[in-house]
Amino acid sequence: MQTLQDWLAHCERLHPKAIELGLDRVRGVWQRMGVAFACPVITVAGTNGKGSTCAMLESIAHQAGWRTGVYTSPHLVHFEERCRLRGQPVAADALVPHFECVEQARQDTQLTYFEFTTLAILSLMAASELDVAILEVGLGGRLDAVNVVDTDCAVITSIDLDHQEFLGPDRESIGREKAGILRAGRPAVVSDPVPPRSVVQTAESVGADLWLLGRDYNFSGDKQQWAWAGRGRRYSGLGYPALRGANQLVNASGVLAALTALRDRLPVTAQAVRTGLALVDLPGRFQIVPGQPTLVLDVAHNPHSVAALAANLDAMGFYPTTRAVFGAMGDKDLNAMLRKMDPLVDVWYFTDLDTPRAASAASLQALWRAQTTRKDAVAHTHAGPLEALRSAMAAADPTDRILVFGSFYTVGGVLKDGLPRLQARHLGS
């Protein structure tokens, strides 16, 4: 195995299951690897807002002059997107020696694709002379592979129902799993405005330094600017984050709390905060592509994130017709997602996705028909996201709005092959 693609193919063959939660196997391999971080580690868990939180932490720390490393998943187009060093995606060749390191330490231990690749990326980050490592949890927290690393500051973003088959049937159960990343004596920043009681109880039981929104830190704002205050630190007259959406202030507030909690080890200036928030970039999160018709890309893939997407779309103003390219995993609460968007979408373009987990375009169309209250809306089915988007663009007027959402696979399928060409057409060049 000479290339990253060789190793990724190897990882896909190793374990019969895509997901097998549990730290014993991963921790054993990690310990045999003998890897450790020499810099502060910030671990981010939650149902929604993790990616945005990681991106803002990275952007502010980078503007403060710190050498940053970020691990996030899944990727949209290329695997290398999962690891950014000093603001740039890692080179494929740089990962290969660390896959070899995992393989040698693995011995006869079976690792899932996620576990193997996580250990390889953690190994690379630990060897990269970083000033701060920012780690996004993949699924849950307590039993996620990322949790082999003891965090110096945990952030728990909004918690809602998702992956119930692994994490439990309600917010309390899911919150307990997310809170598994907390450590004794270390800051535990909770940016969910109404966290499950289980998160608070876990923080108290392990002796974490709990930071609650509304108690330990707060934010306020108007249409022009916003302000933050918490535990001896205050920022006023802040510009809104470059990431769009009303929910981003909640995420940004958690970010400022985490950086305040770590200020003795990772000080940042007010100017780094302002510039970092102004320049933060995260593709696929309420991303609006310039041109006509308006094109919106969003990886919203559960009812909570789709509700936030619907609110953000409402705030955009009037469009004669909204066309939606939608593909999603079959294990999601698809009826709830469709109900949230039904009042906003006039024409649906349901699409198949290139993964066995996905619901078929035909099944999505059937679910929509069974629950829609719209007499004027119509729907089509397509074999892939790019084909669906092309169909939507061909039918759209310049004043229409096109939305691509439902999964990383849906947005990634558009970005992977066609967006540059579509943008050229989109912009009339």
Image (cartoon, rainbow, N blue to C red):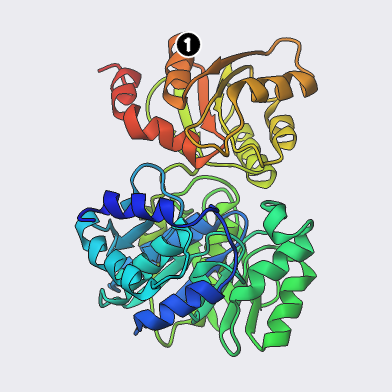
Name the quadrant of the N terminus: bottom left
Label 1's element?
Answer: loop
Please name whichever residue, 176 or 343, is drawn nearer the observer in this view of the structure. 176
State the image coordinates of residue 297 (x, y, percent, origin top left).
48, 35
User: Which residue is drawn at the image coordinates 69% and 81% (left, top)?
Assistant: 203
State the image coordinates of residue 399 (x, y, percent, origin top left).
49, 16
User: Which residue is drawn at the image coordinates 60% and 42% (left, top)?
Assistant: 301
**Amino acid type indicated by mark 1:** Asp
User: Which residue is drawn at the image coordinates 50% and 60% (left, top)?
Assistant: 53
Question: Is residue 37 in view from this perspective?
Answer: no
Q: Is residue 361 left or right of residue 102?
A: right
Please name whichever residue, 99 or 69, is drawn nearer the observer in this view of the structure. 99
Name the residue beneath numbered marker 1: 397
Question: 103 above or below 92?
Answer: below
User: Which residue is drawn at the image coordinates 70% and 30% (left, top)?
Assistant: 338
Image quarter of residue 108: bottom left
Q: Is residue 170 left or right of residue 75?
A: right
Name the quadrant of the C terminus: top left
State the image coordinates of residue 285 (x, y, percent, origin top left).
49, 44
Image quarter of residue 273: bottom left
